[in-house]
Amino acid sequence: MSRGDMAKPLLGHGSTAGERSPPPVPAGRTVGVLGSGDFARSLAVRLVRSGFRVVVGSRNPKRKASLFPAAAEVTFQAEAVKKADVIFVAIFREHYSTLCDLADVLVGKILVDVSNNTEINHHKESNAEYLASLFPACTVVKAFNVVSAWTLQSGARDGNKQVLICSNNQEAKRTIAEIAQVMGFTPVDMGCMSSACEIENIPLRLLPAWKIPIFLALGLFLCFFTYNLIRQVIHPYIREQKNKLYKIPIEVVNTTLPCVSYVMLSLVYLPGVLAACSQLYYGTKYRRFPDWLDQWLQHRKQIGLLSFFCAALHAVYSLCLPMRRSHRYLLIETAVKQAMEKKMTVWVEEEVWRMEIYISVGIIALGLLSLLAITSLPSIANSLNWREFSFIQSSLGFIALVISTLHTLTYGWSRAFDENQYKFYLPPTYTLTLLVPCTVIIAKVIFSLPCIQHRLLRIRRGWEKGRYVKFVLPSATGEFSSGETSSNV
Ligand SMILES: Cc1cc2nc3c(=O)[nH]c(=O)nc-3n(C[C@H](O)[C@H](O)[C@H](O)COP(=O)(O)OP(=O)(O)OC[C@H]3O[C@@H](n4cnc5c(N)ncnc54)[C@H](O)[C@@H]3O)c2cc1C
Ligand SMILES: NC(=O)c1ccc[n+]([C@@H]2O[C@H](COP(=O)([O-])OP(=O)(O)OC[C@H]3O[C@@H](n4cnc5c(N)ncnc54)[C@H](OP(=O)(O)O)[C@@H]3O)[C@@H](O)[C@H]2O)c1
Ligand code: HEM
């Protein structure tokens, strides 16, 4: 099987449980299950509900029979194996060798290896290959290991449960794919048996696509938190011996979270800008991006969702700011001070407007980010066409970045130029966050200038600045010399 065949639905085009009616259950098919543990029980329940006859092979059938649905026959391993052509081996790899006594009765049968490992396998042969080596007269298919016992019990209700299948035998693979589809799952062809190791490693990977974005978010959080701690707690203590430790749990965190969110949001749109710069510079879209940019482009969804997560937390923290006892004490203190100074009005028109605007703008930005987060759910994304999806992700996402910038700027206002700050100048944190977002916004504005936009669009439709065609000229001696010609397309 070629690599191009990998990761394709095995039956028909994009065959999902909901899209097309499953094939009829192969008439009178009896399926065997070896083992009586959690997985075997759930598998038996699902197979019985899907219309198969099930025969379970156990070392102790009498004791285990009551655990299975009445429609399933529970018997000794050798008996079960005789009655079925397809046998699910629902036992752990360590115990495969105990099945060797059954080798004679297993000849010509399809064995489905559903096993997982406890650690990622880098070098060892896969469990399925090991099973195949123990039973050379059987056909081994790797399948169902990415489905949990719980999912088997509850059924593939969200219509998106894939069963990854691989085997060296096409016919056996097709048979298991049909069974999977009748059970309500989506079979996905992962090629030949050498893919088994990769399939066995899948359930062991912990959020592989999230690792880099999570480290990025934690790194930014740590940097901004340290800076805010110095600025809001340590600095006032050194300067005025004031104890501001109470600020750490809410104020320092609520200055840190929006900065992380805002910078991460700009990092979602920066790689698109860099991709566009590269395309403009080289005058082609067919040149491969460097690996780091490729990786970055692929992680934008996770970076964006983490940005949304931090923004949502920031909104909740912000709403809690006036609830705090420290806030009330400070308010009363200010009121008492003003009463003693006989000040009757404390209303500052500019401050009032500034706050009304930045809170309102912040809410709009969060609303737009929520829209992006909702459309990233597979069920919603699947209901949108490409234009709708890219309008929301690309255009509305960029608008969310612009509005977040307005929110930050109206919040910051003239704070950066406050003269009091200049004695021991530690710039307000928001000033540090503005660099990347403003660069992205300016770059996007430049790219929208008609002359540049036109060129970029042409490149993205396949136009190239210069195309070099390599050719070889046969020389008089019969040797070849190389030359180059260029043609503008
Ligand atoms: C809350 C939230 C949720 C998100 N959810 C998702 C999500 O579900 N799915 C998702 O994909 N993103 C998601 N994102 C990330 C982001 O919204 C999208 O990636 C968005 O499309 C980026 O827009 P863009 O204009 O920068 O780039 P794009 O619209 O992707 O690209 C602009 C142009 O750059 C070029 N380009 C981009 N990538 C490549 C590439 N790899 N190879 C060659 N050319 C390229 C193309 O020519 C394209 O026309 C999310 C972001 C947030 C904040
Ligand atoms: N649980 C899950 O969610 C899940 C998900 C995906 C894959 N899997 C895979 O499915 C297989 C079974 O998992 P499980 O959770 O069902 O395990 P389990 O509950 O421990 O059951 C294992 C079964 O193996 C049988 N067995 C046969 N020979 C054995 C021996 N020599 N020693 C001990 N047991 C023996 C036993 O049944 P008898 O006593 O009746 O013979 C036992 O009930 C494993 O390979 C696992 O990786 C499980
Ligand atoms: C419901 C939505 C929002 C509300 C109510 C809100 C509210 C606030 C408040 C009250 C502050 C001042 C915090 C303080 O006093 O320290 C603030 C600052 C800030 N907000 Fe928001 N905000 C919202 C959404 C957002 C979003 C979506 C972003 C960006 C993604 C964002 C980015 C920022 C930034 C960068 C600051 C400056 C932090 C600093 O340097 O002190 N906010 N916001």
Image (spheres, rainbow, N blue to C red):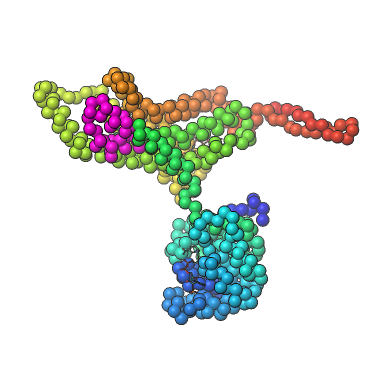
* Image quadrant in which you'd find residue 189: bottom right
Left or right, 111 with reference to 43: right
Please state the horizontal and vertical placement of residue 72, each as a whole percent of the image. Answer: 49, 76
Residue at 16% from the left image edge and 28% from the top image edge: 334
Up the image or down, 325 lies above or below 131; here it is: above
- Position of the N terminus, as image quadrant, is bottom right
Up the image or down, 436 lies above or below 316; here it is: above
Residue 237 located within the stretch drawn in magenta: yes
Residues in magenta? 228-257
* Image quadrant in which you'd find residue 320: top left
Up the image or down, 40 lies above or below 331; here it is: below
Q: Of all residues shown, which one is farthest toward the top?
A: 419
Q: Nearer the viewer, residue 118 or 78?
A: 118
- Position of the C terminus, as image quadrant, is top right
Q: Nearer the viewer, residue 486 or 330?
A: 330
* Image quadrant in which you'd find residue 122: bottom right
